[in-house]
Structures are given as C-alpha cells and as structure tokens.
Image (cartoon, rainbow, N blue to C red):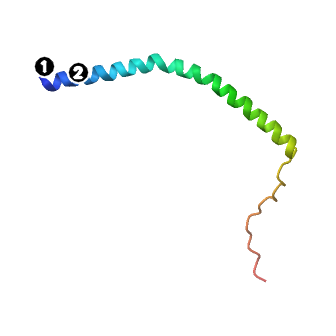
Amino acid sequence: MGPAGSGFSLLVALIGALLGLLWLFVPFAIFGIKGLLQQIVAEQRRTNEILSRVHGERLPPAAPEPQPFRARPYP
C-alpha cells in the first residue's frame, strides 16, 4: 500500500475512533440533560401560574371572521 492508502486508512481509523467515543458518551449527556429539562419545565409552569394570577385567564378578543371580497354588480 502506498502513502496515500496508509493516510486514508489512518483517517478512517480516526473518524471511527471519534464516532466510537461519541457513541459511548452521548447517552450519558442525554441523561444528564433530562434533569435540567425537568427543572426548566417546572419553572415554566410556576411562571405560567404566576402570570395567570396576575393577569387572570384573559384571552384576547376574538377578531371578526374575514369575509372574501365580492364585487357588487354594476347598477
């Protein structure tokens, strides 16, 4: 095998090792984030509760239903 072939083999081995490390560590990162996401959701629910107490359960007034344009007949 020439120098180009051995360089390519080394590149493939490095990419394989990198993917192997990612395959190993990504599940731990996901499980680590899970607790943080639960805290964020709890804080968001608390914020929504505070906002509903301050502003009440108000909804914006409903807009009238849009009507399609119809040209009147010529008199």
Most extreme residue toward the bottom is 75
Q: Mark 2 and mark 1 in contact (Cβ < 8 Å)? A: yes
Q: Tell me the quarter of the image containing the C terminus.
A: bottom right
* Residue 48 in view, yes or no: yes
Name the element at disc 2: helix
Side (left or right) of 65 relative to 27: right
Q: Which residue is mark 1?
A: 1
* Residue 57 in view, yes or no: no
Q: Which residue is mark 2?
A: 9
Q: Amino acid at mark 1?
A: Met
Side (left or right) of 5 relative to 21: left
Name the element at disc 1: loop
Residue 9 is situated, as x and y percent measured from the top left of the image, at 23, 21
In terms of sequence position, does the residue under pointer 1 or pointer 2 come before the other? 1
Query: Dot 1: few (<14), some (14–19), or many (≥20) neighbours within 10 Å?
Result: few
Side (left or right) of 37 relative to 44: left
Residue in the image at 44% along x and 18% along y: 23
Picture quarter containing residue 8?
Answer: top left
